[in-house]
Amino acid sequence: MAEQKSTIAFYGGAGDVTGANFLFTDGPSGLRILVDCGLFQGRKAFDEKNAEPFAYDPKTIDYLFVTHAHLDHIGRIPKLVRDGFRGKIYSTGPTKEIAEISLLDTLNLFKKENEEDEPFFDSSDIRQALSQWDLIDYGETMNLKEGLRVCLHDAGHIIGSTMYEFARGDKRLVFTGDLGNSPSPLLRDTELLTNANYMVMESVYGDRNHEDRSERHDLLEDAIEDTVQAGGTLMIPVFSVERTQEMLFEIENMMEQSRIPLVPVFLDSPMGIEVTAVYKKYSRYLNADVREQIEQEGNSIFRFPQLHMTMTTDESKAILRANPKKIVMAGSGMSTGGRIIHHEKNYLSDPRSTLLLVGYQQVGSLGRQLQDGAKVVRILHEDVPVRAQVRVIHGYSAHKDSDHLLEFVDSTKSTLIKVFVTMGETKSSLFLAQRLRDYLGVKAEVPVEKEVAEIDL
């Protein structure tokens, strides 16, 4: 019997930024390996899509490798387990710990916001998933079956984020996950690859570039100073993982260097507070400069006099009574829920205040509406006029921009057979694929959802 071809099936993250879910079927060994199993996010229509049956039988999956702990990469893992998956899950230590925090938080949020509907997973499914979850670290190689091996590389996106390289002989298939916007204030740079043959890569910013990295500090400093001088509140919707910690680190250093006024800083995110503790625990994953600062100052990052971490609902509500000259950081990063929407409801109508967007805003989200200049938005069943300034800093994105995605692929173009451009809006993915073809001479394709591609591995 002829040996079966290896294939990659694109069951999420194709034609959309979110819902990453790729099935690698290895022909020689017959292993069925998932990379990521994330939520579709940003539009209400995706709520039902998340609860739909998987396009494959979870009972037939041997392994799940998790690139990082953002919900669009982990959010359907408990459903996968509920539907019969009993294989091994692998990731780095920080990814597993943050995934547990994030999944429990998501379940609680769903129950609060959907009292009449049953969630498509429960806490027992999360516990079962964690019981199947083992750890692996950067640089480690694990032998799977029939000569197939997997190795981890640092993606530099969030703490513990990973690229997975599957290899047999001298043939290599790489799933990039999300690639970091290096250099990061906190993390090590994305590892460069030089010998990949096939690549499944992200393209969130495939069609545009960020500001120069040196500008992001100045733009953040200006936003803080201008808002405080006007007597208003600076609202920063943040993702609980990475963006929260980057903003805290930057603001802490600016205050210590007397670059910005010493105003109260509220981290109004229980999940963000818990994840910040994980960053402290896994400080060895941070870049050399941050580790040196920790050693010199006695692990003082994310701890300064102006910082108030508000865990409880009562503490969160009390922020409104504080001096209006303040900085409020809260989730969610796209303003699709969480505590930030209460602050936006309170302060968006205030012309002295500022909303500062520092991350990607999914099409259809409240954050995207605000970014696109909406004059009135609907929050908690009320129409809220937008009189506050809305500023955007793309330089703090945790994703590489178009030029740096091109640069990343350039390092291994001589060995590449094909690149599958995924995890981006369609126009972004198509633009990047065309740039890869035009500038690097690389064969690049943009798969559609449920497409199955053959590879020689």
Image (cartoon, rainbow, N blue to C red):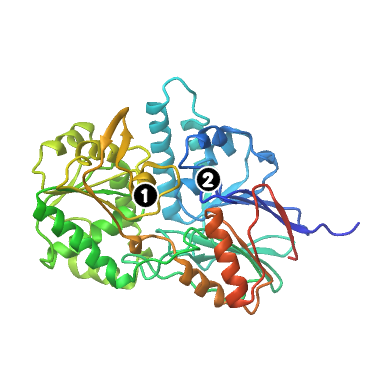
Q: Residue at x 41, y 48 (%)?
A: 97
Q: Quadrant of residue 415?
A: bottom right
- Point out the residue furthest to the front here: 375
Q: Nearer the viewer, mark 1 or mark 2?
A: 1
> Camera-side residue: 216 or 307?
216
Q: Are marks 1 and 2 in contact (CB under 8 Å)?
A: no
The reply to whether residue 299 is in sight is no
Q: Is residue 259 above or below residue 314?
A: below
* Circle 1 residues within 10 Å: few <14, some 14–19, many ≥20: few
Q: Is residue 125 left or right of residue 167?
A: left
The reply to whether residue 17 is in sight is: yes
| Amino acid type, label 1 | Asp
Q: Earlier in the sequence, mark 1 or mark 2?
A: 2
Measured Cα–Cα span from mark 1 to mark 2: 26 Å
Name the quadrant containing residue 381. Answer: top left
Check disc 2 and give the amino acid type.
Gly
371 relative to 268 in the view: left or right:
right
Q: Position of residue 48 (x, y in %)?
A: 54, 32
Q: Is residue 406 left or right of residue 283?
A: right
Mark 2 surroundings within 10 Å by alpha-carbon count, few (fewer than 14), some (14 through 19), many (20 or more): many
Residue sitting at x 23%, y 61%: 220
Quadrant (top left/top right/bottom left/bottom right) for the C terminus: bottom right
Front residue of this view, candidates 41 and 283 = 41
Residue 368 in percent (x, y) is at: 38, 47
Q: Residue at x 65, y 51 (%)?
A: 448
The residue positioned 58% from the left and 57% from the top of the image is 422
Dot 2 falls on a residue whose secondary structure is loop
Q: Which residue is mark 1?
A: 372
Residue 38 bears which disc, if any? 2
Q: Residue furthest top?
A: 116
Q: Is residue 217 above or below residue 363?
A: below
Question: Could you tell me which secondary element the residue under label 1 belongs to?
Answer: loop
